[in-house]
Image (cartoon, rainbow, N blue to C red):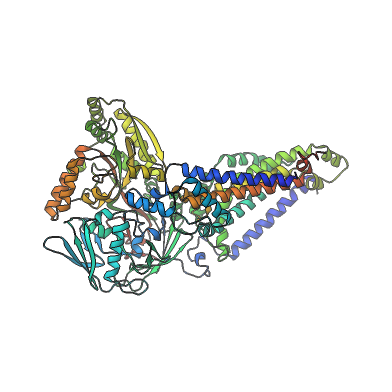
Amino acid sequence: MPYWTRKAAGALATLWLASVAVFLLLHLAPGDPVSAALGAEADQEQREQLGRQLGVDRPLPVQYLTWLRGLLTGDPGLSFRYREPVTKMIGQSLGSTIQLALAAGLLMLVLGLLLGAALAAERRGRLARALDPVTTAVLALPVYVTAVLFVFVFAVLLRVLPAGGEKDLFAAPDLAVQYLALPAVALALPGSVVLARLLATEIRRTRQEEFVLTAIAKGAPPRRILLRHVLPNSLAPFFVEFGLNLGELLGGAVVAEQLFARHGLGQLLLDAINQRDYPVAQTLIMLAVAVAVTVQLGSELLVGRLDPRIARAGTGEAR
Amino acid sequence: MSDAAHRHALPRRGFLGLSAGAVLLAAGCRSATDPTADGAKGASATASAPDLQIVYGSAPDPTQLLHRGPDTPAFVNLVLDRLVDLDPQTLQPVPWLATSWEWSADRLKLVLKLREDVTFHDGRALSADDVVFSLVGAAKTSQVKPLLERLADIRASAGNEVTLTLARPTSNLFDALAFNPVVDARSYVDGKAADKVNGTGPFTWQSFKGGNQLDLARYDRYWQSGRPRFERITIRSVTSSQAALSALQSGQAQLIGAVPGRDLKVLAGNPGFTVQSAKASYQQAFLGVNIATKPFDDIRVRQALQYAVDRERIVSQVYGGSAEASSLPWPSNTPGVTPDQVKRYGHDPEKARGLLKEAGAEGARVPLTAANSPVFASLVELVKFDLEQAGFGVDVQLLDNAAIQPKIQQGTLEGLFVANHGMVSVSPLSGITVSGPLQVGKNTSHVTDPAFAELQSRAFAAVDEKARADVNHELSEYLLAQSFHITLAHAWETYALASSVHDVATSALGYLRLTDTRRDG
């Protein structure tokens, strides 16, 4: 079976298993949407009426199949809480999260590459020596600590960037970028440090490879060795890790959106889980799984292209 | 150029380029921290900012306006009006949309006269039919519908007159009228308001963006002449109290609501901010006791709990002083309540241990359940410590809100539980009629004592002030003696304001009133 077919089949199976797991985990967790919506004072009649309206009185397999069919046809139903189409609610928050994820992803990539190259420098200057403890500190600090620190310094103390909120990127791009700056940096920093360390290790390992030593022996200029030989052969694990980190950005966005008061998908998901708004929560989690699976698939295919030995493994074309 | 220089050339050049670009960009664009830059409207740099920016913990929800009672977000008062308000000091009704009222001799009929100069934001005049629609809707779906159960008939007896007929006399009808807002009958369909809520309040509903930002504008034809004083208000829903505090400190907001105790300490002494509490308590934190489970079937064990908890420490550490320690669930200014009753149970671990020993319950292990939120987690920590000092063994279980609500509704919480409720702040009768933890007949504590129901019947019939004060006093004595509901603190609704904001008022229910509010500069 071709490499990409195997990977695509695996991705589809993962998505289906995830849909079952997400549905069961949410429905079997204590609490229910009727209680969350009506509060402690509601009587039995009100509860039963709302339960019927929401459809939570039907058997679980029926509820699962209804939701799955809706998901596949692009209409996962109405929000239990707001009685609005789930797609409309996700659409309202999607832009915010995409902006944050793209900004954070881009920062993570650029910082990861630059820091990785600096950390792997052959002659360790002051910069490289200073970067070691800095990257360790950043790795040790969770997003919520760096976020609070950034807000205190840049928003409260210096008042050069807003503490939270967001603006429409298309209506006011100059303001939107400023609103994005702190959450994007806070979200990108831990991932970029992980990427940088990985890249530095790979660069050091690749430098010891025979083809690099041969190039050095032939007198190739260092810049050409780095750009043509060392970097391309060090980037595969970097991109796989980058893909994984991109998939995890939604998780980080939940925290970053809370701390920076952005109303994105992370905040929507948190509210939906707290309110047991199953259609919204299930669809959002599946969206996150689909993004993670797609990015992972993409990076695996990219790795297969970068290093054909990996694509050939297990296909009988090992040589 | 050396090898090292080659290696560093690209990043250094790139860095310098990026820096220069950033400086040029920064010089050419507006600053998001400049209050005159209003990107939300996509307007030019000279557009004026909203007059008042508020950050609040909960989002407005148009589907809940009729259903919700005490939990309705506080800013509903800015868009909608109620028939009557309650005086924060006396808790007596004061005219609002209803200018006057008259009871029949047998107290079974109430005729309400409505203001004639009130219009909805779409320009239509308020009619008696809108009031009937709102009350009928509340009687069907509101969380406080038990307060309206004695209503036999609601009808518009004239264009500006509504007549309410009661099946039996009831002394707390005005509590229900003060809770339920008057909505527009024409734009409210299937229990859900239109996307743009049409009310009669001082501000009009402009837009509700992305589920978290509500834009309001001054209603020029508001019935209070010359009010409100603001052209625009923006209310952002921010669930993180840290983010809300940052918004205030950075100047992005001038008013934040529901400020946690620890943040009050941060703001205390800073001349840039003021803290304001609605001292008519709305949320009351309590330790609930399921008396159907051992050892709490013994009244001595329950009284040991009363002496075990250190209420003053809870007020100081959990609420930053913005609360009141009391042994009773209703406010200390409730007619008939005496200071002795309010302070009946002081912190006395020795006495608690003595009572436990007498009941043979020393070392009893008891479950303690609460919602998993910062405030409840802090409360549980302190209560657990106090109970352990008194000789209990405590097993804590924190559940998220959606998981604990059905247990409260179904009365399946075992042992002890920490929660809060609000209806008790209006009157003892409304508290024991509506609030799940205290509700006569089906409360979370499983109290089925006929004496409790008898007190409720007497409270309903106590229509004159003296009789009401007497029955309130007796109800208080009953609760203190039975001790199935251990009051921990009356938490005041607390707002933090920029010092440039003045005249922010709060209703007896803790709701914001911004009709007279103004802001310097």
Q: Would residue A191 appear left or right of B449 to someone viewing this image? A: right
Q: Position of residue A247 (x, y in %)?
A: 61, 47
Where does the C terminus of chain B fall, quadrant-wise? Answer: bottom left
Q: Can you tell which quarter of the image residue B17 is in?
A: bottom right
Q: Position of residue B491 (x, y in %)?
A: 31, 47
**Residue displayed at 46% across by 69% down:** B48
**Residue displayed at 32% across by 57% down:** B141
Q: Nearer the viewer, residue A57 or A118?
A: A57
Furthest-right residue in this view: A218
Q: Can you tell which quarter of the image residue B403 is in?
A: top left
Q: Position of residue A215 (x, y in %)?
A: 85, 42
- The answer to whether one can see residue A292 in this image is yes
B181 relative to B339, above or below: below
B10 relative to B194, above or below: above
Q: How many marks?
A: 0
Q: Can you tell which quarter of the image residue B192 is in?
A: bottom left
- The answer to whether one can see residue B87 in this image is no
Q: Nearer the viewer, residue B327 or A215?
A: B327
Q: Position of residue B195 (x, y in %)?
A: 43, 65
Q: Nearer the viewer, residue B349 or A160?
A: B349
Q: Would residue B247 appear left or right of B77 to someone viewing this image? A: right
